[in-house]
Image (cartoon, coloured by chain):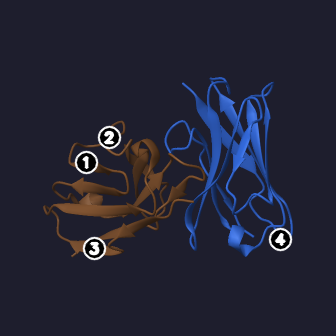
Chain colours: A brown, B blue
Amino acid sequence: EIVLTQSPGTLSLSPGERVTLSCGASQSVSGDYLAWYQQKPGQAPRLLIYGASTRATDIPDRFSGSGSGTDFTLTISRLEPEDFAVYYCQQYGTLPITFGQGTRLEIK
Amino acid sequence: QVQLQQWGAGLLKPSETLSLTCGVNGGSLSNYYWSWIRQSPGKGLEWIGEINHSGITHYNPSLKSRVTMSVDTSKSQFSLILTSVTAADTAVYYCTRGVLLRPPWGQGTLVTV
């Protein structure tokens, strides 16, 4: 199975800053079928990005995804207070579908 | 607009069988695969498997020996059976269309073992 490794595990930043989260795959993600989710405490995950770079419905344009093959990134151009959460990546190009372990973004 | 509603027992004892069903309202099971995904505190997000309207299934190898998925097209429902549960199976279970956690998807069921 494809193992996704997210880095860093935890990131402490301030509102207004730019942040880039990484997701590395143990083998190439077929079709660049890579998604990103945001999850806040007590809530279900929220899809942000699919197909490595396509924003999901109603997702603000400060969120952007890029990458291909084995290296993918999620960038938040300017952090808003509501962006502090846990972020997960998911590959869905090869079965079994797998998820990363998450990156926690916390307020500095 | 397609909506998914899921139901099933939320409290189980070790060795019992987990049974969840997901009903598809406002749409057909055809043309899609339908997945079960779970989230537990210990293992994060985990794809359990998928099934299509013809009953073709793909399971996560890590759970394959204990998982059975089925579909009832007459009722527009699909189901998950997970046998011999342990505390490690405690999680919120979601049903969803396709393999992404996005609408249409179920509301999630907390299953505690």
Give percent across and percent down for residue B45: 55, 61
Q: Amino acid at mark 3?
A: Leu
List the residue tagged with mark 2: A55
Residue B46 located left or right of residue A41: right
Q: Secondary structure at mark 2?
A: strand
Q: Amino acid at mark 2?
A: Arg
Q: Residues within 10 Å of mark 3 (few under 14, many from 20)?
A: some
Between disc 4 and disc 1, the foreground one is: 1
Asked whether residue B97 is in view, the answer is yes
Cβ–Cβ under 8 Å for marks 3 and 2: no
Q: Which residue occupies 28% across, 73% down?
A: A11
Give percent across and percent down for residue B19: 80, 52
Give percent across and percent down for residue B16: 86, 65
Placement of B75 over or under A31, stated as above or below: above
Q: Amino acid at mark 1?
A: Ser
Q: Which residue occupies 44% across, 50% down?
A: A29
Q: Residues within 10 Å of mark 4 (few under 14, many from 20)?
A: few
Q: Chain of mark 3?
A: A
